[in-house]
Image: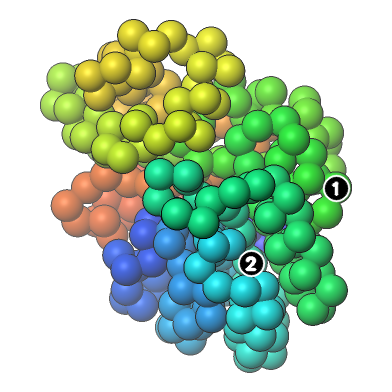
Amino acid sequence: MALRDRLGPYGVWHLEDAVTPELAAGLEDAGYGAVWLGQAAPDLSGAERLLDATRTLVVATGIVNVWQAGAEVVAAGFHRVAARHPDRLVVGVGTGHPEAHRQYAAPYRTLADFTAALLTAGVPADRLVLAALGPRVLRLAADRTAGAHPYLVPVEHTRRARAAVGPGPLLVPEHAAVLDPDPASARARGRAGVDFPYLRLVNYRTNLRRLGWADADLADGGSDALVDALVAHGDAAAVAAGLAAHRAAGADHVAIQLLADDLLAGYRELAPALGLTGPAAG
C-alpha cells in the first residue's frame, strides 16, 4: 500500500511525551491513520513503543531535530524499527528554531546534508518527510523525499505549498483544534496553544508574514483572525469543516493537534464528523 493511502485523510499530532501506547491504540480504533510525534527521540524508541502497541497505525516523527544527533543514529533506529514494523514508520526531520539551538547555522545546507546521509544509509525516500515552510525547503522535500510536513500553517499555506511542490509529493500540514462551541473560550484556549512559544519564533513569524499577516496580527498572542486561521474551533462539525479546508486546498493528510484535557475522548467525538469509522479508515 502506498504511504498516501496508508496515512488516510486524518492523523494526530502531539509531543512524543504526550502519546501513550493506550492513546495510540485508541486513536487507531477511532479510525485515525497516523500519529505524528513532536520532539521525537532520534533513535526512534518512542515511535517503536507505539508501533508495538498498535496494528495498522502509521507512526511518524514530526520531527526529529537534526541538531540532536547524527543521521547515523536516526538511520539505525529506522532500520531496527522497520524490520519489525514494515510500512508503518515514517521519519520526519527538520531544523527546528534558532532560538532553541546554539549550534543553529546554515539550516538549509544542514538539512540537505542530513537528508542525503539518511538516504545514503538506506532510509527509503518514500518513508522520509521534511518539516518545510518556505519555498526552498518545500522544494527540497519534494525533490528528495516523500514530501513536506508543515507546522502552524493556515489553509492558504497549504494552497501555496501544493502549487509549489506539484501534485505528486505528500503534503501533511499540522493544524490545531478546539472542541468548544463558544467562540470566546475556544479562542482563548487556541491562543494559549499557538502563542507560546510558536508566535514568538522567527521561523513561524516569517512564514506568516510571507502569507500576508501583519505584525499587529502576530502581537499579544495573535489577533482573533489569526487564531481562527490557525485553530479550528466550534462543535465537531465546525472543527471538521475547518480541517477539511486543508484537504480541499491540496493536503493529502492533516495532522490534528487537539487542545483538550481528555485527548482520547475528544478525538473519539471528532472522528465521525471527519468520516472516520474504524481502524485506519481512509
Mark 2 belongs to which amino acid? Val
Q: Is residue 23 left or right of residue 185?
A: right
- In this rendering, the answer to whether 63 lies above or below 99 is below
Q: Residue 210 sits in which quadrant?
A: top right
Residue 84 visible in this rendered orientation of the protein: yes
Q: Is residue 86 left or right of residue 242?
A: right
Q: Residue at x 50, y 41 (%)?
A: 151
Q: Is residue 97 left or right of residue 253?
A: left
Point out residue 55 in the picture as x, y percentages from the top left corner: 53, 80
Residue 9 visible in this rendered orientation of the protein: no
Mark 1 belongs to which amino acid? Asp
Question: What element does badge 1 sit on?
Answer: helix
Q: Is residue 33 left or right of residue 240?
A: right
Which marked residue is nearer to the observer: mark 1 or mark 2? 1
Which mark, residue 143?
1
Point out residue 6 in the picture as x, y percentages from the top left corner: 67, 62
Q: Disc 2 designates what residue?
A: 90
Question: What element does badge 2 sit on?
Answer: strand
Return the disc, 1 or 2, that comes first in the chain's sequence: 2
